[in-house]
């Protein structure tokens, strides 16, 4: 029940904000609005106020604002010509269409800082002293001489008190020399390393990790760890006879190859031996056994200024990640099976609602940002498609033909229906898998 209610709330907010944008600018521009609908299809309930009918419709996966003279070829009376959408200038129509996705972007921009002020779930290690728990072999830090147990004191002269400050400072340096103040056994010294970036990150990477116990959190269905009998809460003692004291060590051993490995795990004070053969993941291009680390979290809130800064950086990072994913889907780097639809959104919404208000708002902000950006893509049926046609009309000096617009809308509709079928299939496949 929580999942269903959360899904309706999240989707309702996204649709309402989007359509309010169209509605408000249309009204301000003198365009008549006949219907304001949350949902598509037959009306469930509705009320008329002035010229506009406000309604809830049967299918909740969207909404619309029906304006006077909006449809191509629609008959408009003489007195309604001045209130007709299609009789307004290109700039006015463009502003009305663009206002929907821009309202979604504004909502995301307002919510992200609010979320940080309310408080977000953050890994507990971020507040711990920056003591090195593991140094990845062949990393810049290892080559510079840093080792497990070292304490990071500063980055390029800037003091750091915890892992969050270290990560924030070091992420700014990419393929640049970094002077790192370090203390070891009461001796202070400085090492210089060139922070490179990982394949998936556009940020400085040194190869340093905090202390991370090799304790299993969750297991993924369809992967060998769960099938072999490993449980959540198990502590990994060794793999193939090699002692494991840090989670990063475990990851490196697992991802090395697909050969069967002998795990020794501690469970309820007893050591168990379990054989596990890693499974290759085509998307990540690595061998996995299907385990995640048990993580401790704390709720952390920030001041207004810092929340605004973090909210802005989060918006930028998520926008960049969206385009990276789209690029990966187009180039084949990512599988279309990774796409999710309404069922996935409902599950995530339910989980977020059970976690807390901030997590539910974070989901709304994330989806609102994605919705705003994607709606601006130049695809017929989407707002971006209309904006493209208005741009062509402005250059051409006359409206595009009704036949062309009709065919373009049909093509766009087929594309969106096909995409919806695909993501729904993916959702159902995950459930039954």
Image (spheres, rainbow, N blue to C red):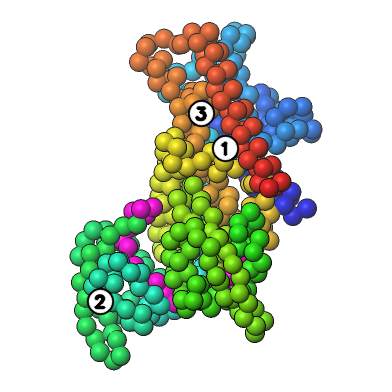
Vertical relation: 341 (above or below) 305: above
- 291 sits left or right of 146 in the view: right
Indicate the secondary structure of the residue bearing disc 2: loop
Q: Which residue is drawn at 41% across and 51% down?
A: 317
Considering only order in the chain, which callout, 1 or 2, is on the residue closer to the N terminus?
1
Indicate the secondary structure of the residue bearing disc 3: helix
Question: Does residue 49 show up?
Answer: no
Residue neighbourhood size for the residue with mark 2, other residues' Cα within 10 Å, grouped as few (<14), some (14–19), many (≥20): few
- The image's mark for residue 291 is none
Query: For mark 2, what is the residue?
Result: 145
Magenta segment, prevailing SS (helix, strand or loop)? loop
Tell me residue 330's x, y (percent). 44, 34
Q: Which is more toward the observer, 247 or 127?
A: 247
> Which residues fall within the magenta stretch?
199-218
Residue neighbourhood size for the residue with mark 1, other residues' Cα within 10 Å, grouped as few (<14), some (14–19), many (≥20): many
- 38 sits left or right of 124 in the view: right
Query: For mark 1, what is the residue?
Result: 18
- 314 sits left or right of 12 in the view: left
Considering only order in the chain, which callout, 2 or 3, is on the residue closer to the N terminus?
2
Query: For mark 3, what is the residue?
Result: 383
Q: Which is more toward the observer, 145 or 369?
A: 145
Assess whether residue 211 is covered by the magenta stretch: yes
Tell me residue 332's x, y (percent). 45, 37
Residue neighbourhood size for the residue with mark 3, other residues' Cα within 10 Å, grouped as few (<14), some (14–19), many (≥20): many
Q: Residue at x 70, y 29 (%)?
A: 40
The answer to the question of whether label 3 and label 2 lie on touching residues, with beta carbons closer than 8 A, is no
Q: Which residue is drawn at 50% across and 72% down?
A: 240
Vertical relation: 370 (above or below) 89: below
Vertical relation: 301 (above or below) 32: below
């Amino acid at each position: 029940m929580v999942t269903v209610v959360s899904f309706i709330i999240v989707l309702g907010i996204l649709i309402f904000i989007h359509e309010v944008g169209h509605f408000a600018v249309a009204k301000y521009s003198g365009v008549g609005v006949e219907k304001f609908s949350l949902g598509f299809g037959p009306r469930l309930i509705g009320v008329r106020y002035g010229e506009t009918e406000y309604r809830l419709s049967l299918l909740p996966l969207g909404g619309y604002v029906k304006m006077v003279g909006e449809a191509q070829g629609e008959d408009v009376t003489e007195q309604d010509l001045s209130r007709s959408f299609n009789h307004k200038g290109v700039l006015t129509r463009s502003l009305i269409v663009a206002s929907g996705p821009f309202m979604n972007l504004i909502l995301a921009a307002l919510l992200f800082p609010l979320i940080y002020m309310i408080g977000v779930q953050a890994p507990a290690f971020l507040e711990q002293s920056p003591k090195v728990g593991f140094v990845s072999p062949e990393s810049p830090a290892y080559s510079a001489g840093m080792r497990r147990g070292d304490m990071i004191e500063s980055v390029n002269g800037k003091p750091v008190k915890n892992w969050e400050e270290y990560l924030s400072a070091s992420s700014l340096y990419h393929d640049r020399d970094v002077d790192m103040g370090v203390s070891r056994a009461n001796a202070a010294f400085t090492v210089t390393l060139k922070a490179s970036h990982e394949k998936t990150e556009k940020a400085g990477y040194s190869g340093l990790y905090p202390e991370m116990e090799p304790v299993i959190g969750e297991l993924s269905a369809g992967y060998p760890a769960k099938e072999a009998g490993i449980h959540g809460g198990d502590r990994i003692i060794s793999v193939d006879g090699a002692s494991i004291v840090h989670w990063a060590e475990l990851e490196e051993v697992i991802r090395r190859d697909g050969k069967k490995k002998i795990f020794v795990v501690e469970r309820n004070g007893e050591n168990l031996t379990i054989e596990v053969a890693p499974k290759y993941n085509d998307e990540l291009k690595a061998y996995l056994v299907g385990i995640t680390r048990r993580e401790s979290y704390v709720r952390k809130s920030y001041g207004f200024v810092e929340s605004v800064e973090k909210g802005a950086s989060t918006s930028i990072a998520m926008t960049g990640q969206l385009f990276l994913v789209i690029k990966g889907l187009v180039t084949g780097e990512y599988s279309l099976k990774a796409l999710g639809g309404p069922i996935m959104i409902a599950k995530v919404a339910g989980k977020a609602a059970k976690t807390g208000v901030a997590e539910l708002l974070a989901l709304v902000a994330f989806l609102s940002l994605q919705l705003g950006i994607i709606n601006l893509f130049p695809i017929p049926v989407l707002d971006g498609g209309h904006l493209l046609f208005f741009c062509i009309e402005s250059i051409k000096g006359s409206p595009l033909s009704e036949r062309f617009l009709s065919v373009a809308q049909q093509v766009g509709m087929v594309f969106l229906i096909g995409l919806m079928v695909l993501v729904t299939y993916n959702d159902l496949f995950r459930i039954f898998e």
